[in-house]
Image: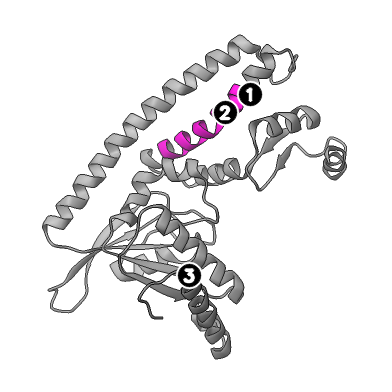
Amino acid sequence: MIERIKSELGNGVSTKLIIYDELKPRHKVNLMRELGIEVLDKIELILQIFALHAGSKEAKLQIEMARITHQLPLIKEWIRRAKLGELPGFLGPGAYAIDTYYKHMKRRLAKIKRELAELRDRRSRERERRRRFGWPQVAITGYANAGKTTLFNTLTNESKPVGPEMFTTLTPKAKGAYLDATKDVKVIFVDTVGFIKDIPAEVIEAFYATLEEVSTADLAILVIDSSEPSFMVADKVRTSLKTLLKIGYIGKPLIIALNKIDLLKSDELYDIITKIKEMVSSLYHWDWSI
């Protein structure tokens, strides 16, 4: 397998290998030693994309927390191998320096957790303030790049940036809007971070304060891009529902909103709705309708 990868990489042309899966520390160290280039796994790739869109202090701290959590087992593997003399000259510093770096990262992780806990408490107090006014909270959620922010902008008359890039929303944005002309009913809409398939545990833990905006909402709108093939749409609905269960959104109303239906023929739309119905019926025993 290593020889095949070397052949695919070419003769010194490639400087980085990305494997879209989660790598165990020993596998990553082995690959880097054999190939002599940087190796990234799925989690590291996701976090690098996140970092491109991290505008707030909270988002940057969440990304750093996930990155350190993911790196610590790898650093421990470096320490183990360096002490056994298996990595002479590889990755630079010796066992003592790596061990010092490991302890530094542990301290940094503890500090980040404290800062995020403070931000989480502040966000919780803000939610309680809104609830005292009797304003229901609606979380706009769903798969990455499905059109959540566009819907949020339309409902709230906001102008948050939108685009084809994934994960443009990392920090939740909440804004109130009236549902009728008499302004009797006000709702707080919250734009949230997009879901991904098989979302890593490190990411869920780091972004818990952000995802909590979904789990504590009174209603969730699950936005799905329906312009993709029907099997992909059904799979993204399945992924999103599993993520909602994982973060604690249970026993509350849920609206599945199919976006971009104007791009579909009537039979294509019918096929998508049928597949979603079949999938939901087979997995969940809920009272529901589409």
Q: Amino acid at mark 1?
A: Glu
> At x 80% / y 29%, what residue is drawn?
34
Q: Are marks 2 and 1 in contact (CB under 8 Å)?
A: yes
Q: Is residue 218 left or right of residue 153?
A: left
Label of residue 224 in the image: 3
> At x 34% / y 36%, what residue is drawn?
116
Callout 1: SS = helix
Q: Residue 284 sits in which quadrant? A: bottom left
Residue 74 lies in the magenta stretch: yes
Q: Main secondary structure of the magenta part?
A: helix
Q: Amino acid at mark 3?
A: Ile
Residue that mark 1 sits on: 77
Label of residue 135 in the image: none
Q: Is residue 36 left or right of residue 264?
A: right
In the rendered structure, which disc, 3 or 1, sits on the residue that comes first in sequence? 1
Crowd rating for badge 3 (residues with CA inside 10 Å; few <14, some 14–19, many 20+): many
**Is 69 situated above or below 198?**
above
**Is 104 situated above or below 14?**
above
Q: Residue 176 sits in which quadrant? A: bottom left
Callout 3: SS = strand
Q: Quadrant of the N terminus?
A: top right
Callout 2: SS = helix
